Image: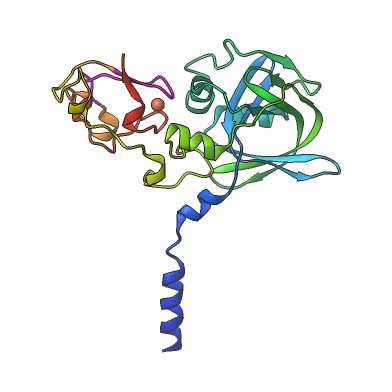
Amino acid sequence: VKLAINWFIFGIKSFMDYRAFQHLSYGLYLVATALNNRKAGYIANTVFQVTSKPPRVAVSCHKENESLKVILESKVFSVNVLAKETPAGLIGNFGYMSGSEIDKFAGIETISGITGAPVVSSSCLAWLDCRVEETLDLGTHMLIIGQVADSAVLAEGEPLTYRYYRKKFRMVSPVHAPTYIENEKLHPQNVSEKQPAADIPGTSQEDDNEPYICAICGHIYRPEEGDPSVGIPPGTPFNKLPEEYRCPICNAGKDYFKPM
Ligand code: FE
């Protein structure tokens, strides 16, 4: 009987409330690296200082992330603190696109730090230039510990926090983020009240066959193609997509698609 009670209690305990994890505070950072003049970078929320003497930071990086290979080979990386006003396009490019698809650093100002890692001035308030000291294999992710070799403040301003970003763009964590939650639903506080389409002058409930573009990552939904990745058949107009439809690239909700 005692064993049965223990199992029962264990069973209750295992129903974790993943919203608790969303109460952890994070910033949002551009982590950059380079090898033989080839730059790579990604957006990380899990960056934190772990010791002061010597100053060390830890960053977590998904193993499918191209930047990880470059960091492990070059053994250098920079942590660039994004400003609150960072344009969504910058985060979209670094956070959701692959370096093989686009030149992520086009239009981004960088200089080479003393480690050789590129430090970024566009949209950034400060940077830390680091050498890799330790790595820890965590299955899906690698935890990288770097010793800070150099640092600078570029501008006064408010750093972008993960919470602010999620609220502003009504995002859920992308699948490669350490904070990803499977089947995460949008928190009600993140969803603004929508005006019924019929009440907005000049709009109607009629189907439209216009392509729609994701404001976060630039992905284009084309009705004639549908979205085979989630079983949306070709010929499905945007307004006939299910309400829970999400951008296949960045996971943004339907509200973030605009007609082109
Ligand atoms: Fe997107």
Instruction: Identify whether 220 is placed above or below 185.
Output: above
- Residue furthest out toward the bottom: 1
- Residue furthest out toward the left: 206
Q: Quadrant of ligand 1?
A: top left
- Residue furthest out toward the top: 107
Name the image quarter holding the C terminus. top left
Q: Residue at x 51, y 34 (%)?
A: 165
Instruction: Tell whether position 199 is magenta.
Output: no
> 166 left or right of 59?
left
Q: Residue at x 50, y 55 (%)?
A: 20
The image shows residue 13 at horizontal and vertical percentages of 46, 69
The image shows residue 97 at horizontal and vertical percentages of 48, 23
The image's colour scheme reads rainbow
Instruction: Tell whether position 213 is magenta.
Output: yes
Instruction: Identify whether 45 is placed above or below 8.
Output: above
> 25 left or right of 180?
right
Q: Residue at x 13, y 22 (%)?
A: 206
Of residue 85 and residue 244, the one placed in the foreground of this image is 85
- Residue furthest out toward the right: 53
Task: Report how many numbered discs are placed on residues in the image.
Answer: 0
| Image quadrant where residue 107 sits | top right
Q: Give the residues in magenta.
A: 212-226
The image shows residue 73 at horizontal and vertical percentages of 68, 28
Of residue 47 and residue 208, the one placed in the foreground of this image is 208
